[in-house]
Image (cartoon, grey):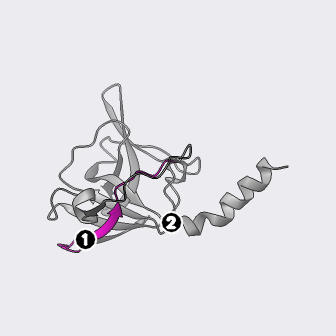
Amino acid sequence: MKELLIYQKGESTELRPLPAEQIHAGFEYPAADYEEERIDLNAYVSKDSHTTFYARVVGECMTGSGIYPDDLLVVDRSLTPIQGDIVVGILENEFILRAYFKKNSKEYLMPDSPYYKPIERNDSTQFEIWGVVPHVILDQRRRTSARINRFEQLLR
């Protein structure tokens, strides 16, 4: 059931330039000023480096949420999960990736794939929420062939 490889976030002081204008995904936007802003990606994804880890996804239980094998998760152990959060749990001493869901005072770890079953917290399946996933870093180029297939379907 092993689905994650965990790495701890290190301190980073490297900053990358970022153009000050926004990227609009729905319409053309005339170019504005090109004032340079610097960002620290680690500061963007985390407030505390001691509670933040990176995890590589193994398995396909969250593909409905757009999370695929080899995507890189940012896992924050300081966050308390709320309904619908993607979480890293521990079940039977193994890390698992699921969504947190609570209904009628029962807690579940929910997959986002029809090939996996929900896990209810009860006497026989005690799970621990290890951390919350606020960000996912994915490689868009790995998804190129699936995107091309969708485009070809649209143009038929």
Q: Residue furthest right?
A: 156
Bin the neighbour count of mark 2 within 10 Å (Cα to Cα): few under 14, some 14-19, many 20 and up: some
Amino acid type at mark 1? Leu
Q: Residue at x 23, y 74 (%)?
A: 14
Q: Residue at x 67, y 60 (%)?
A: 146
What's drawn in magenta, residue-wise? 8-24
Rendered view: 100 above or below 89: above
Amino acid type at mark 2? Pro
Residue position marked by numbered label 1 in the rendering: 15
| Front position in the image: 129 or 132 | 132
- In the rendered structure, find residue 137 and report the number of the disc placed on it: none
Give the secondary structure at mark 2. Answer: loop
Residue position marked by numbered label 2 in the rendering: 69
Q: Residue furthest top?
A: 104
What secondary structure prevails in the magenta region? Answer: loop
Give the secondary structure at mark 1. Answer: loop
Q: Is residue 25 magenta?
A: no
Say which label, 1 or 2, has the lower sequence index: 1
Bin the neighbour count of mark 1 within 10 Å (Cα to Cα): few under 14, some 14-19, many 20 and up: few
Rendered view: 108 above or below 1: above
Locate residue 110, reporting x and y percent: 44, 44
**Quadrant into which the N terminus falls:** bottom left
Left or right of 148: which side holds 26?
A: left
